């Protein structure tokens, strides 16, 4: 894999995805290797994030790399009217790689065009969050021992949720069956259904969150955001309808695992947390290994070094 | 000492306190040992702090550990409605230890119950700040060559000051005499007087800050906060009454040392700073060694490693 | 050079400036030496900065040093009413060196008087920003192969721009000719003209940004800030008059290089960026080597160590 930016999950072929997942496995099994020693990595968060930023910082620190950056745009020169181009060009003079989150869709692509070092997109608005998708895939392969032929349920905000869209596209390499569960107003957009139709991938749409989940290998829960609804009553109703409760897991498959990109609000009851099928916190931990693999791959570091 | 969280100073027995202080002394005398190499420590400050955070970060950096975290809740997912439980569970996947400051009393205890790694309480509201107490004890033993049989004056806000309450409880292991100097409205609460009575520890209460300090081995000054008073005139009067000035130190004992947890506002005059009895900045420095000892003890690292 | 603070560019003699530039060259040619291993450096930014802070952090990280600090005053105890003296005295107990930016003129000098470790002034209001000047000089010597006998054009806000004033004073050691181009209201202050007259250094003042730049070896562009004008129309006019465009570079000297301390707003057109004479992003990169040299010099680390 040549040295380059990661802007969209579509930048990676199926083969490259599998290589990243294999490298992540190697890093999980061989921790605290100092592969990033002597590297300086910038983490530029133009909007706040706990999980993604800290996960990257853990990944980098554990491998001996050094970090610089900012955690929100207010403590940067952006507040002096500097363009994104100038910020990126400058920071690319200070670092070997830039991890970047920005509220504007397309900003990561633009940054990758002006930067002198590779860019990793850590979320650009509603558009892409490819490192999340790779850690989702790593969590699936780790728990299911395979990526092929799985029955994947996607629940919650299927309209705006970028993690859902990216996961759908990446999983489409592996002959899945999809089940979409959402409120009428938050259904999966037509473009994704056409995409699946073209690949002859089966999918089913539901508006009720019922015992159909007994067929699931993976349930991927997502947060429904208040700002998606103009009517607050409708939001409250939706928020409280698509909630996973522990008793709903009674007749589910043994290999079922519950994923969630986090943060959650109330869409998974706290009583699910102790169920062995709950996997979302381990999924967060997988983010460390996956991001180590992505960085290593982009910097051209391989495990036999 | 087994691996575990430090939530309250009462988590430590007298013997354990003395072990920490001895380890701090070892670290002061043997600096820049890389005992924390390969460790990633999270510093989660849900409310801002200069001193405590930077002191922990100095302690960790000097011993080769790595740091991730946030400096206020705004740059975290808390602003997206994430629960403390989820934040702590996630960050405990990214790190080997969590240092945490939070405005809510009891939050550190709760965090220690949900975390998969040890928690160090770096202040939970008005409740506890045990690493401050340990550095206060280290400053006392370092300057007095002992902890036993000392005459300790506590001055300022004795009602709300968490550092005062914790120090009082910890020092009660060492047969002290206490003198309390405060405004009528900021007297030491009755529960602490009952606690001392039960242990047959002598204490005296004063509302005037006079030459009674000639008997003191330690004067522990604290800040009086404006928000404790509904009447601003009464605040101004109080603020200006319990002020330590250099001339007041004329007839004091040679071994007397002035402590203050800092930050100060005006309760110690600047003219005291150059008096050899002023010890509060050195006390801050002791925080580095004490926190190294606490972290090492919790991570199960010992000096003979 | 003995261990001491860097508050003003005037703290360094011509000989010392040349030593710093030589050391910067050595560090550029010998990267990733771990000269700062075991050192803890505080970066205290009482007001936000991307470039200066990240440049220092890159410099320190690449040489193996460790960093602690804050990126704006809100996440420090300053918000609890702590004095600058107390903050500096405390942080000087935690670190080996303090890099500091503060909005008040004179604050760096004051900090250097109360600190127990050296202070590097990373900008104190409109007063001084000496590490910027040293990286400007490094950029000049690197591109011109000399500092002596150059024709230096200074453009934009010559009245308030601290980088302009410091560069003027530093370059005056090297027999330059100056050309000043600015709006009538932003002319170079008289005190600097008197300073140059006393040294018999030639200078010319212009209000038009024309083909006179054909004589330039260095054009140093600066940002015109809106807040300098009471009349917004006059600001807009000025902002759009002193703009460097690519076609203006047609008949300029081959060795000409364009510098800018950045961030820019619109005073250099984007079409200049790809011109080989545009040097402002490389100039930013030079900040890393120059700051490494300054820190090494202050900490008494030399390259033969």
Image (cartoon, coloured by chain):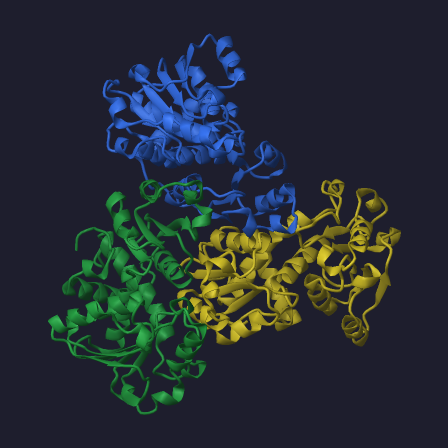
Chain colours: A yellow, B blue, C green
Q: Is residue B234 above or below residue C254?
A: above
- At which x and y percent is residue A8? 62, 70
- Which of the image's four quarters has the C terminus of chain B? top left
Q: Residue at x 36, y 88 (%)?
A: C248
Q: Residue at x 32, y 87 (%)?
A: C210
Looking at the image, can residue C30 be seen? no
Q: Residue at x 61, y 45 (%)?
A: B87
On screen, residue A22 versus residue C231, left or right, reads right
Query: Residue C62, located in which quarter of the rendered image?
Result: bottom left
- At which x and y percent is residue B91? 57, 46
On screen, residue A111 versus residue A274, left or right, reads left
Q: Is residue C258 above or below residue B244?
A: below
User: Which of C157 and A81 lies nearest the eye of the viewer?
Assistant: C157
- The mark total stands at 0
- At which x and y percent is residue C281? 38, 73
Looking at the image, can residue C256 be seen? yes
User: Which of A8 and B134 lies nearest the eye of the viewer?
Assistant: B134
- At which x and y percent is residue B32? 33, 42
Query: Residue C199, located in which quarter of the rendered image?
Result: bottom left
Q: Residue at x 47, y 24 (%)?
A: B166
On screen, residue B285 versus residue A174, left or right, reads left
Q: Is residue C3 above or below residue B267?
A: below
Query: Residue A147, located in which quarter of the rendered image?
Result: bottom right
Q: Residue furthest bottom?
A: C251
Q: Residue furthest top?
A: B200
User: Which of A139 and C99 lies nearest the eye of the viewer?
Assistant: C99
């Amino acid at each position: 894999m040549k040295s380059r930016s990661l802007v969209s999950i579509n930048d990676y072929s199926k083969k490259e995805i599998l290589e990243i997942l294999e490298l992540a496995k190697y890093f999980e099994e061989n921790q605290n290797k100092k592969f990033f020693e002597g590297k300086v990595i910038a983490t530029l968060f133009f909007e706040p994030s706990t999980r993604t930023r800290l996960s990257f910082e853990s990944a980098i620190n554990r491998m001996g790399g050094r970090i610089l950056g900012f955690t929100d745009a207010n403590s940067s020169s952006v507040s002096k009217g500097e363009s994104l181009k100038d910020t990126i060009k400058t920071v690319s003079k200070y670092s070997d790689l830039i991890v970047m989150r920005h509220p504007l869709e397309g900003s990561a692509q633009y940054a990758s065009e002006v930067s002198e070092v590779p860019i990793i997109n850590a979320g650009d608005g509603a558009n892409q969050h490819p490192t999340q998708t790779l850690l989702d895939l790593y969590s699936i392969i780790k728990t299911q021992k395979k990526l092929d032929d799985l029955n994947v349920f996607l629940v919650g905000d299927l309209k705006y949720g970028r993690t859902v869209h990216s996961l759908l596209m990446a999983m489409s390499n592996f002959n899945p069956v999809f089940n979409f569960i959402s409120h009428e107003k938050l259904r999966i957009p037509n473009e994704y259904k056409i995409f699946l139709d073209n690949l002859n991938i089966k999918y089913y749409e539901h508006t009720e969150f019922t015992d159909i989940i007994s067929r699931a290998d993976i349930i991927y829960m997502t947060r429904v955001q208040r700002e998606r609804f103009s009517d607050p009553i409708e939001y409250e109703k939706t928020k409280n309808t698509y909630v996973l409760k522990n008793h709903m897991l009674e007749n589910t498959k043994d290999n079922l695992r519950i994923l969630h990109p986090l943060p959650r609000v109330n869409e998974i009851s706290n009583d699910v947390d102790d169920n062995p099928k709950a996997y979302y916190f381990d999924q967060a931990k997988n983010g460390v290994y996956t991001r180590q693999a992505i960085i290593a791959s982009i910097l051209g570091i391989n495990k036999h070094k």
